[in-house]
Image: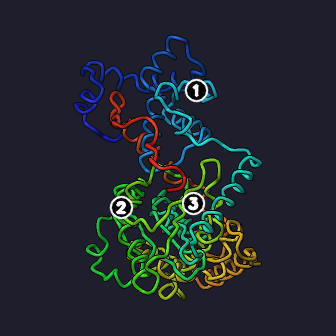
Amino acid sequence: MRKKCESRQSAMQKYGISQATLFRIYAQSERIKNDFESRMEFSTFETRLMQRAIDIDRIVHQWYLRCKERNEQMTEADIKRRALEINMKLLGTPSFSAGRAWFQRFKKRYSITNADVKVTVPVKTETIAAEAFKADFNRLLIERRIILRNVYNVVYTTIMWKIVPEGTCIMDRAKLTGNLEMCEDYVTALFCANATGCRKLPVLLIGTEPDIHVLHNYDTEAFSPIYKSNANACMDRTIFKEWYEHIFLESVKARQREDAPREQYLLLLDNVMSLHNLNDLHDLDRSVIFMSLPVNVSPLRQPMNCGIISCFKRKYRIELLKTTMPITVGGTEEDLIDVHKQISKWDCCRIVHNAWSSVDYAILISSWDNLLTVRMVRSISFEDKWEADMQEIFKIMKVLPACEECEEIHVYNWFSIENQYDIVKKKCVEEVLREFNDNPVNIGIIDDEAGPSRAKLSKRS
């Protein structure tokens, strides 16, 4: 606080100390700092004092609750890794290891059950469960006479919407200036399409800006994406229910008005059950059946995650670079950096529209082949698709200023950057640490039940 030129009065109030104590700390600040940095281990008494001042369990629990609030699935490894990170950043107990014994005590202290933490399932066990689910899924289609045109999968994911690859002048400048905010700014996008590839519903985007139509005075309805605002840019039950009622069901009703009033529909959900109140959704329209992946089957096995979303993200990043081209071709490094700074959420909606429209029809169909048994597996080379998209990126890079250092590995990592960053969990850590630094004595408690609330229906309703 002293280095930031904050007032003495604010320091005294924040830590509840007298003016004399504050002056002693100021006068001896260098000695205090040197003593602390040179000390490699702590006495039992000092360790207890530190644990009392910095209750790592309590802060980790705050992080856990924030992640839960944003419907992030947590594993034991996630919690242990973040506990170590938080302990290190707060200069907590050096011997803290976040081991198995600590994790069990942590669960017991906060009444976290096994259902609240996703267990890592052995590959063989998951494969057996996935095959069983596949058989159950196809049996349901036959029993209910659901045609493939009426079978949909819905998935939401994060998109780091402004990030660019390493080796570009934009990224180099961001690192040089320490301005990496554009790397971590994200939106949540919800995708839904059917098993025959003939129906792609508009993408739902969730950002933090309250209303991009008002902010930019543009007709955002010209594009298919639907924009919703949320304080943390994450999906919640309210937004999902609005999407289901006003987008998905309206699409179903339009189909029913055409020529198929009695047909049934199936909507395949992921296994983040805390997001969906299936009873409420089922009551809105009885012609729609829900099915969700079992908890011991990875969400990566559902169709949207078997090529559709990865294709979309590659197309999105190609369109992002194209946004800079008309102005910066033949321009300078500064021109390119300035253009990138000006890219807005309205531009994001436009780019999402173009990218979603560019997802190959063949990918929309073939992504279902691991789940369906009623049709032949289509031979499609995903490697060829990646290679073609990568070549298009390098073609654009050649005409952009100061981007010649970008290499193939940089583009490869850029295509799947969200998988590496785990951005929502990272943001939750930053929130908790910021709150603790603002008020280390009374870090706020989220008033919520331990563990995620579960849907009231089973995997099929």
Per the image, label 1 sits on a secondary structure element best described as helix
Q: Is residue 132 visible?
A: yes
Name the residue type under label 1. Gln
Picture disc at residue 104: 1
Q: Is residue 405 above or below residue 452?
A: below
Mark closest to the chain's N terminus, 1 or 2? 1
Q: Is residue 155 above or below residue 148?
A: above
Mark closest to the chain's N terminus, 3 or 1? 1
Per the image, label 2 sits on a secondary structure element best described as loop
Which residue matches tag 3? 418
Residue 428: percent from left, percent from top: 45, 46
Per the image, label 3 sits on a secondary structure element best described as helix
Which residue matches tag 2? 208
What residue is at 54 percent from the left and 88 percent from the top? Answer: 330
Q: Are marks 2 and 3 in contact (CB under 8 Å)?
A: no
Name the residue type under label 3. Glu
User: Which label lies toward us, 1 or 2?
Assistant: 1
